[in-house]
């Protein structure tokens, strides 16, 4: 199975029932139409709770009552239509396949990619120079090599 797009889920319907041609509706809208025994159809959709039912394709007679189905992000939900219309045993069997999510293709982070200036700012260079000059002056003063240093007077006897 192929990856499920980021933020989506995939619904797969497999008709394995002994039934006339049928339509599978999701939230009362026909999503998979004219399925007959052995057919399979798939569609990516929004994750969440949905109502699924089956009606006859030729006249819209309800064949399977609405059933709540939870579609999870990044997973595939396979719905099997099983049973016999003649014996009134039509029903759903559901299989969830997880771990098929794909990574997001991009991350919305602003416009144009100008999140940060790639150059080292001038104020930072100036601060480093001032700090180094202060450090150099401290080292020179501590070593006693400063110009204009006053020596204490010598005692004579």
Image (spheres, rainbow, N blue to C red):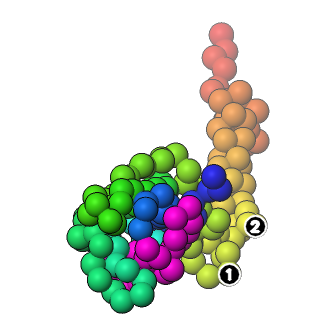
Q: Is residue 8 above or below residue 28?
A: above
Q: Mark 2 falls on what kind of element? A: loop
To which residue does mark 2 refer?
A: 119
Taking the image as shown, residue 23 lies to the left or right of residue 41, namely left
Residue 77: image x %, image y %?
44, 56
Q: Mark 1 falls on what kind of element? A: loop
Residue 123: image x %, image y %?
65, 67
Nearer the observer: mark 2 or 1; the answer is 1
Taking the image as shown, residue 21 lies to the left or right of residue 61, namely right
What residue is rendered at 64% in x and 26% in y? 153
Extreme residue in the bottom direction: 59
Near mark 2 (Cα within 10 A), the count class, few <14, some 14-19 or many ≥20, is few
What residue is rendered at 69% in x and 67% in y? 121
What residue is rendered at 75% in x and 67% in y? 119
State the extent of the magenta-drawn residues as a range. 20-44
Q: Is residue 24 above or below residue 79?
A: below
What residue is rendered at 48% in x and 58% in y? 16
Taking the image as shown, residue 63 lies to the left or right of residue 76, namely left
Along the line of sight, which residue is nearer the eye, 17 or 136?
Answer: 17
Magenta-drawn stretch contains 23: yes
The prevailing secondary structure element of the residues shown in magenta is strand
Q: Which image quadrant for residue 50?
A: bottom left
Disc on res. 112: 1
Along the line of sight, which residue is nearer the eye, 4 or 42?
Answer: 42
Residue 97: image x %, image y %?
48, 47
Magenta-drawn stretch contains 7: no
Along the line of sight, which residue is nearer the eye, 31 or 89?
Answer: 89
The quadrant of the rendering that contains the C terminus is top right
């Amino acid at each position: 199975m192929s990856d499920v797009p980021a933020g989506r889920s995939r619904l797969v319907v497999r008709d394995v029932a002994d039934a006339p041609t049928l339509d599978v509706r999701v939230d009362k809208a026909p999503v998979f139409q004219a399925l007959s025994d052995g057919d399979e159809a798939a569609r990516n959709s929004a994750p969440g709770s949905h109502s699924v039912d089956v009606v006859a394709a030729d006249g819209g007679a309800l064949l399977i009552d609405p059933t709540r189905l939870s579609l999870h992000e990044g997973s595939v939900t396979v719905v099997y239509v099983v049973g016999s219309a003649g014996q009134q045993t039509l029903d759903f069997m559901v299989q969830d396949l997880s771990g098929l999510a794909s990574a997001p293709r991009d991350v919305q982070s602003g416009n144009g990619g100008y999140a940060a200036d790639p150059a080292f700012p001038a104020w930072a260079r100036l601060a480093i120079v001032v700090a180094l000059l202060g450090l150099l002056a401290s080292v020179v003063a501590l070593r006693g090599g400063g110009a204009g240093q006053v020596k204490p007077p010598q005692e004579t006897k």
